[in-house]
Image: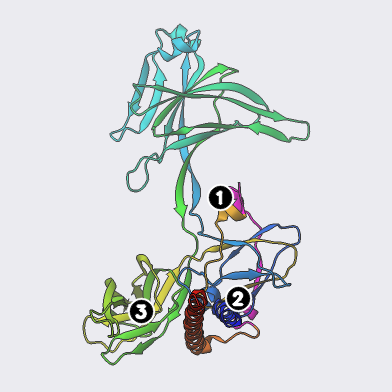
Amino acid sequence: MRSPAAAALLLAGACHAAAPADGAAGYSHAIQLSVSKDSGLAALRLPQQVYLGSRSAALDDLRVFDRKGAAVPFALLAPPVQTRTTVTDLPVRIFPLKSAAGTAADAAGTRLDIRTDGSGRLLSVASSAASPAAAARETLSHLILEIDGAQDARGVARPVSALRFELPPGTPSYSAQLWLETSNDLQHWEPSCAAELSWLSNADAETLSNSRMALQPTHFRYARISWRSGTPLEFARIVAESASTAEAAPPLDTLLLQPSVAKNGDLVYRSSIAIPAERIGMAFGAANAVFPVTLGIYEPVPSRHRRHQPEWRFVPVLNTTFYRISQQGVERMSGDAAIAETHTDTWVAKAQQASAQQPALRVSWTPSTLLLLANGNGPYQLKFGRAGVQKAALQPSQIAPGFSADELRALPQAHADLSTADAAPGAPSAPAAASTESGATGRTMVLWAVLLAGIALLAYFVRTLLRQMNGSQQPK
């Protein structure tokens, strides 16, 4: 009975030895992180050193430990696309319209004398009075506005999102309720919005004003303003605001890779498997260079024969021409090309014609953001550079539940001490990573051999025990 028990202990020990402990040791790189004391959550834009030292395409080997060596929860967040709003001021031409009508509705029905040029630009706007006596009784009733620059340089109409009003000199205070109608032909008018405008001035000439009329972004060329309350006033200046929103991509990190020449003449660029390349370009040392090239990677293809090693197939990623040309003092250079996100540790450039050029390869990517749940035991260690470990990052919703995208962007930033990014104390250095991995593979093979031997030994003792039991049960 002792022999099977010993075999079981041997098997358990082998299994325990085969499962490596995921502690703070064993990672080739470490970066010290500092977080402010009053921050429970902090963010860090992953530095370039992380992508160069990581051994996983998905950054599965990232870990965060506190000063006591305890694991700290963290998540990786793709930087959200930010929107940028630009407001353009469009000048407005003002045409006062006088009327002798008693009400605004009557004034709106007054026959107008409108003069325009061939492009539709207003020259004058006036009401046609029935008699000289009626003309003498006319007072300001409307303002006809024409938006200058209603179209951009491409002829695309600009939407108007607000109007700003300025009082004439000598009018410190004023209040009124305005009604706005819009048109594109001065014949058909559409109601738009109403707004209360006010300017309040004190004895120190300080003014508190509400001088802006906001409206839904609308395309129009002409506008008509009337008064619902307050005294009609010819404003000194009216400005139209046109707001445009564009997406602003997060800033990219860029790495310049130097080539080596393969036996077949291809240019080979060593990179990191962790870099999610999304733009690539080439940098030339010569003043004038043209380089038609096919850039790609090699992927393994399983061999038909099990004993044979896998074959390699070239997969093109980009087929283009990079160049740098100086002409009459003006330099023209090719820009970086967008590609599908690609992870590889080796880029290959195949020149489409014989060339002595050996340009550097420029690789760009968008770094992820690390969300750190601080436990108060800082400073912390961001460790990476270890093959064969499982993913430890949580989902952002598990680290920051209920946080909006704007709140995540506003999180305080952790400080990374990049001087410690070269190598973690007591861990293998980056140049020795390959030998470390091969050594780990050898140890794994030994452990598997011990495990299989233990299983075989256990099966032998079980068989022996069964024979003994069967022999003892036979009648004497």
**Residue depicted at 49% across the width and 90% down the height:** 435
Of residues 152 and 469, the one nearer the viewer is 469
Between marks 2 and 1 in the image, the one whose residue lies nearer the viewer: 2
118 to 313, vertically: above or below: above
> Magenta part of the protein: which range?
400-424
Image side of residue 70 versus residue 289, left or right: right
Looking at the rendered structure, the secondary structure element under dot 2 is: loop
Q: What residue type is labelled 2?
A: Ala
Disc 1 to disc 3, C-alpha distance: 35 Å
x, y percent for residue 173: 68, 27
Q: Which mark is residue 312?
A: none
Count residues near mark 3 (Cα–Cα under 10 Å), then give few for <14, some for 14-19, many for 20+.
Answer: many
Tag 2 residue: 21
Does the magenta-highlighted stretch encompass residue 402?
yes
Tag 1 residue: 405
Disc 2 to disc 1, C-alpha distance: 36 Å
Q: Earlier in the sequence, mark 2 or mark 1?
A: 2
Looking at the rendered structure, the secondary structure element under dot 1 is: helix
Tag 3 residue: 347
Q: Which amino acid does label 1 sit on?
A: Ala
Image side of residue 30 versus residue 342, left or right: right
Image quadrant in which you'd find residue 158: top left
Quadrant including the N terminus: bottom right
Looking at the image, the residue that sits furthest to the left is 353
Looking at the rendered structure, the secondary structure element under dot 3 is: strand
Count residues near mark 1 (Cα–Cα under 10 Å), then give few for <14, some for 14-19, many for 20+.
Answer: few
Q: What residue type is labelled 3?
A: Trp
Does the magenta-highlighted stretch encompass residue 305?
no
328 to 258, vertically: above or below: above
x, y percent for residue 338: 35, 65
x, y percent for residue 138: 49, 13
Q: Which of marks 1 and 3 is nearer the N terminus?
A: 3
